[in-house]
């Protein structure tokens, strides 16, 4: 572990002190940041892609190939990640 024990203790204490709504807000913000980073990566790899195509590619990254194919009919192995 790369976190000092006293810092780890402080972090655990802060998480325990948070309300469920606060914890959910932190997780939501992290998910939004991950989606934003994935979107940037897709746009760099596919600069010609439409907004809808970028959204499909980000969804495929999040869900994986099998679920993306089953739910959206989008096969990232065919279309590209």
Image: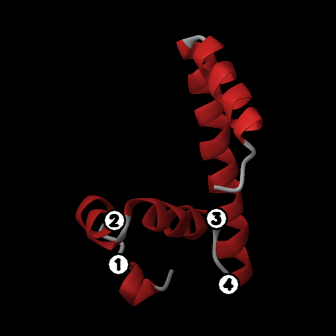
Are the residues at dot 4 and dot 1 in contact (C-beta closer than 8 Å)?
no
> For the residues marked 4 and 1, what is the alpha-carbon distance in whole angstroms?
17 Å
Q: Quickly name the residue at label 3.
A: 38
40, 11: nearer the viewer: 11
Q: Secondary structure at mark 3?
A: helix
What colour-coding does the image apply?
A: secondary structure
Which of the two labelled residues, at mark 4 and mark 2, occupies the earlier sequence position? 4
Mark closest to the chain's N terminus, 3 or 2: 3
* Residue 29 pos. (x, y %): 67, 37
For numbered disc 2, what is the local secondary structure? helix
Judge the density around disc 4: few (<14), some (14-19), many (≥20) Cα neighbours within 10 Å: few
Cα separation between marks 3 and 2 = 16 Å
Distance, label 2 to label 1, CA atoms, is: 7 Å
Q: Please tell me which of labels 1 and 3 falls first in the chain.
A: 3
> Label 1's element?
loop
Q: Residues within 10 Å of mark 3 (few under 14, many from 20)?
A: some
Label 4 sits on residue: 45
Find residue 38 and report its image quarter.
bottom right
**Element at badge 4?**
helix
Task: Classify residue 45 as left or right of residue 76.
Answer: right
Q: Looking at the image, do the residues carrying marks 3 and 2 touch, with CB atoms under 8 Å apart?
A: no
Q: Which residue is mark 1?
A: 75
- Residue drawn at point x = 51 percent, y = 80 percent: 81
The numbered mark, 2 or 1, whose residue comes first in the sequence reads 2
The residue pinned by badge 2 equals 68
Q: Residue at x 38, y 88 (%)?
A: 78
Residue 50 on image: x %, y %: 64, 71
Residue 35, percent from left and from top: 62, 54
Pointer 1 and pointer 3: residues touching (CB < 8 Å)? no
Circles 2 and 1, Cβ within 8 Å, touching? The answer is: yes
Give the label on residue 4, or none.
none
């Amino acid at each position: 572990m790369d976190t000092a024990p006293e810092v780890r203790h402080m972090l655990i204490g802060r998480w325990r002190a948070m309300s469920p709504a606060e914890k959910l807000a932190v997780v939501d913000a992290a998910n939004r940041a991950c989606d934003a980073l994935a979107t940037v990566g897709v746009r760099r790899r596919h600069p010609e892609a439409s907004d809808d195509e970028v959204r499909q590619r980000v969804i495929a990254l999040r869900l994986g190939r099998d679920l993306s194919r089953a739910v959206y009919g989008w096969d990232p192995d065919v279309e590209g990640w």
